[in-house]
Amino acid sequence: MGNSFGKVFKISTFGESHGKGLGVIIDGCPAGLPIDEAFIRQELQRRKPGQSKITTQRKEEDECQILSGVFEGKSTGTPIAIVIMNTDQKSKDYSHIADKYRPSHADYTYQEKFGVRDYRGGGRSSARETAARVAAGAVAKLFLKHIGVEINAYVSQAGHIKLDKPYQELDFAEIEKNIVRCPDPEVAQDMIDYIDEIRKNRDTVGGVVSCVAKNVPVGLGEPVFDRLHADLGKSMLSINAVKGFEYGSGFEGVTMLGSEHNDAFYMDGDTVRTKTNHSGGIQGGISNGEDIYFRVAFKPVATIMKDQDSVNQAGDQVTVSGKGRHDPCVVPRAVPIVEAMAALVLADFVLLKRLNKLDV
Ligand SMILES: Cc1cc2nc3c(=O)[nH]c(=O)nc-3n(C[C@H](O)[C@H](O)[C@H](O)COP(=O)(O)O)c2cc1C
Ligand SMILES: C=C(O[C@@H]1CC(C(=O)O)=C[C@@H](OP(=O)(O)O)[C@H]1O)C(=O)O
């Protein structure tokens, strides 16, 4: 329970941060899809720890191995299993807090729920699990590429430093050119300097990842419950440290009048389009063919290298301070995770749509 995601393009992940390794089983990927292993590896490299001075210094190569479901470079329609081994666990960093709860990490709630806990690196609660999601998301992206869907995420805020430009004015080719993954080089440098300063102060800071999906077919999503934005929201809120999700006009939309907010329709040849896109590409839970865009808010990382008040399992008042390798800010590495989760949701709904209508 709780380890699976998706309806047709389904994934189950397994593994802990300081165990032998982790991985994913993808069930429901259509047969015949060319599986570009180099692309899966590249996506994992974008997420891996130890990639720059503003991420955790844990050094994992995150090389993956495909165990099943692929023959002669193509999916076979059977479960695709991908594993990634752990190689740089430093479990001693957690010995001093084995029975103590890090404020705002998952230690207390996990202990209460299961009564047993692999305290090393947060175990299953560690964001290391997201490596498996990124591997699965890469397969979903390959499927979506096949039908022309493109997904790009980027860092739009780190602490108080904001990228105040609409995504239409950004060059997505710039995203991977800097270590914070902000497409504006000047704002990116400010973000990097700020995160580095916070890191040197033994503290952490939050941020925002924005994401845009283009060329999404019309008709993905259900009118009730499994509304496309509801599943996107759940997928994003399922990522470690996420505190908020908004799509389209989001929270800003509340200050607009209906006359300003409504997206007027027009015909572009045979295609129904909207002049504005406050809807964020989704109306009534169903994609309308416009760009889908949303923002995901991440909190500051819980493990800080400063003394904090806490309690231990016996209920004593204690002091806790983090040790070892931690992200000063998660957003640079969250970019590929957000894209992966968006890809998994969209791939799922594309496959579901095939079940809805006779002519698709
Ligand atoms: C990419 C990424 C990296 C993270 N790195 C750390 C980290 O180094 N240390 C830490 O305490 N939390 C880190 N987190 C956050 C924890 O995993 C998260 O706070 C924890 O699972 C508790 O869940 P919650 O914050 O969603 O309540 C990271 C999250 C993400 C998405
Ligand atoms: C290992 C990864 O990130 C980890 C995520 C994480 C957490 O609490 O979420 C805590 C740290 O774990 P550890 O102390 O075991 O190194 C990060 O390094 C990874 O993303 O691959």
Image (cartoon, rainbow, N blue to C red):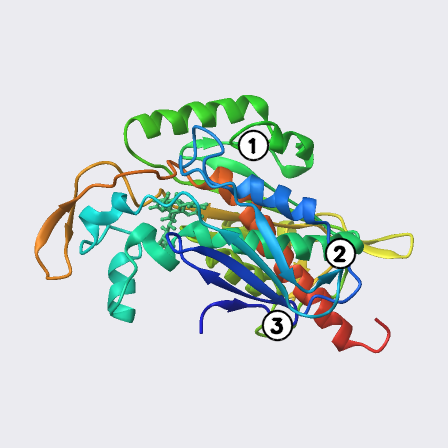
Does residue 6 appear left or right of residue 102 in this picture? right
Q: CA distance from mark 2 to mark 1?
A: 26 Å
Foreground residue among 91 and 111: 91
Q: Residue furthest left?
A: 316
Given the image, on which type of amino acid does mark 3 rest? Lys
Q: Which mark is residue 182?
A: 1
Q: How many neighbours does mark 3 have within 10 angstroms: few (below 14), some (14-19), or many (20 or more)?
A: some
Q: CA distance from mark 3 to mark 2?
A: 22 Å
Instruction: Kindly tell me whether residue 220 is visible in this rendering.
Output: no
Which circle, 1 or 3, is nearer the viewer? 3
* Of the two numbered discs 2 and 1 in the rendering, the one whose residue sits closer to the viewer: 1
In the rendered image, which residue does mark 2 sit on?
A: 289
Residue 7, numbered label:
3
Amino acid residing under circle 1: Cys
- Label 1 sits on a secondary structure element that is loop
**Ligand 1 closer than 8 Å to label 1 CB:** no
Q: Looking at the picture, how far across and down is residue 14, in whole percent?
A: 47, 63
**Which of the 4 quarters of the picture holds residue 53?**
top left
